[in-house]
Amino acid sequence: MFRYVLRRLALSLITLLILIAVIFLLTRVFPSDPARQLAGPFGSQERVDQLNRDLGLQDPMITQFGRLLRDVVTLDFGESYSQPGERVLDLIRPRLANSAKLVLFALILTLPLSIVGGIIAARKKDTLLDRTIVNIGLASSSIPEFVSGVLLQYIIGVKLGWLPAVTNIPDDASLITELRYLLLPALAIVFVYFGYIARITRAGTITALDADYTRTAYMKGLSTRSVVRKHVLRNSLQPTVAVTGTQIGYLFGGLVGLEVVFNYPGLGLLILNAATAPDFPLLQAGVITVAIIFMLCTLGADILIAYMNPRARMNLKESS
Amino acid sequence: MSDDVDVPLEGDPTGGVAASEALATEAIPEAAVVGVDASTERKQVRKERRQLLLRSPGFLFGFSILVMWVLCAAVPSWFTKWGDNEVVRVDGSVIPRVSPRADAWFGTDKIGNDVFARIIYGARPVLIVAVTAAVLAVAAGTLLGLTVGYFRGWVDEVIGRIIEALLSIPVILLAIMVLTTLGRSQTVIILTIAVLFIPVVTRTVRSAVLAEAQLDYVTSAKLRGENSLFVMTREILPNVTGVAVVELTVRIGYAIFTVATLSFLGLNAGDSSAADWGRDLGKQYDTIQAGQWWAAIFPALAIALLVIGVNLVADSLDRVNKS
């Protein structure tokens, strides 16, 4: 198991390295003159040259890439361009915490609902109930999250007035108040992910219910309850764990539209603002943060799967 | 390890049925001599699949939605007397922010445009960009997936790593980065979405090719001494076309999703007053707080309806393809 974790970690690091290279190329190679942007249109040429020297923007590409890697390892991305005097890391930290709060809350709402929905659909396969769950899931998960966000905001926040329509959480809010503010954006996420996770769980459960080991368990004379709990779930939930792992990564940075709708200061909004400023250190650091989170979540999911299913540990050896 | 994650997403791209069918139609071209006409059998399969599709309510519903939007995109003037940018005037005066009523079904927006007309005209830009991007991505991804899946080796390893790296960042973030550095024009947006979708298409096609390449008809083609190009394009490609078609519809759905998000965020190209669902939603959603819901909710519903239509079709095609 320990060897598996090490190998898996090494693979993640390679992936991350490639990704950092891609992000570096995207922000550095394409023609743009950050020093000129910093100095402003009326800044003197001397100022631009000075900035170029200070920021090392005229060093060879490989030196610049090395510096970015050092920044990632030390978690020190220097100063923001758009907010001079602010450390990039200090700008990212509160946003990361906000994104984590929203994602965690949304997952606590989504996972039990969609796993139970998926298992019920699988046990009642091809009945009206199954088709209802699958089709509602398909429809709701295909709608972009900012669209369902706007619809929920209007119906629940404005028309019915049950919940705050924007997330301008007061500073001294208690946890309950904070959750009240977060409930609408979290529901928009539930809307998108319920169908997706329920479908994955349903597919996994159907496979597990049809498997030989399930038949054997039934033939041993075990009750349905104990077959499902001890034999089916352990196997059927593996795809769900894998998918949840990858989706948490997306949720941390991919909710740009939703954060705009609810004016919620998460990572997505930070990256969007960094891109439009443009503030390259902040943009790079923001996207790399999302990549690191994604890496940690998929790593966690794979380790959990390896724990649930010893065969998964073997697969890595064969496939790589 | 990436394969662990792949499995649930892609399920079983080519079931045993497809495999035996492939054997029947491809491996034994002399089958006609034996008595089973391969091409009639294939026609039979296609006919059955078509009938299965036409009996599925999900497909019919999704398909009618698509037909409706394509008609709106093609001939918007059939549906509304207003231009997309034309300010509605009643008795010579501009009437902004009126709620839905008989002479303006969906009301008018902040500027005084007819919201219904903007919904009709808004179908064209999103469909053109999304469909072009998806077609490019699926063409390139199928080619790449076919090549790496057939030859394997170190190129496959390297490309596999790069694909995995690219898939670990939300598409929308990479799109935002590219559009910031390259500037925004319709061409750049189409190419960006196409390039960002290539990795996932490649992965799907590659795993379908891997499954096919193990089958006897491929081995026998190789033993016949056919060259790689022939085996890839004439033997394997026809058997992964179903997967590619499903992938195309799924990608069109995601492309619409991405285009709408980018426009919503204000990252789109072209005339900023032209009708565009995402942009209209982005510009008008603040009026919701004031109770003027129509200018934002209708574009939101239009986006939702189009994506649901595409996904219903994609889902039915997928199911028929696997059956």
Image: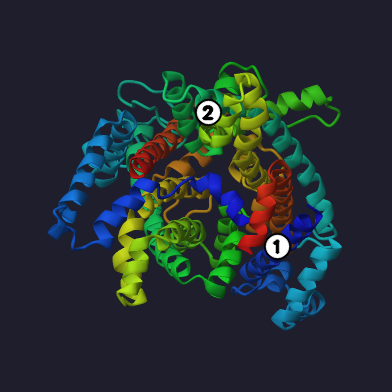
Q: Chain of mark 1?
A: A
Q: Quadrant of the C terminus of chain A?
A: bottom right
Whether the residues at callouts 2 and 1 have beta carbons within 8 Å, the answer is no
Q: Amino acid at mark 1?
A: Leu
- Crowding around mark 1 (Cα neighbors within 10 Å: few <14, some 14 to 19, many 20+) is some
Number of numbered discs overlaid on the protein picture: 2
Residue A151, label in figure: 2
Q: Is B300 in front, or is A222? A: A222
Q: Chain of mark 2?
A: A
Q: Is B319 in front, or is A227? A: A227
Q: Is residue A37 above or below residue B238?
A: below
- The picture quadrant where one finds residue B108 is top left
Q: For this view, does B134 lie left or right of residue A117?
A: left
Residue occupying the point 46% across, 72% down: B151
Give coordinates of residue A210: x percent, y percent: 50, 33
Residue identified by numbered label 1: A11
Q: Is residue B4 above or below residue B51?
A: below
Q: For this view, does B149 lie left or right of residue A112?
A: left
Q: Is residue A28 above or below residue B35?
A: below
Are tags 2 and 1 found on a single chain?
yes
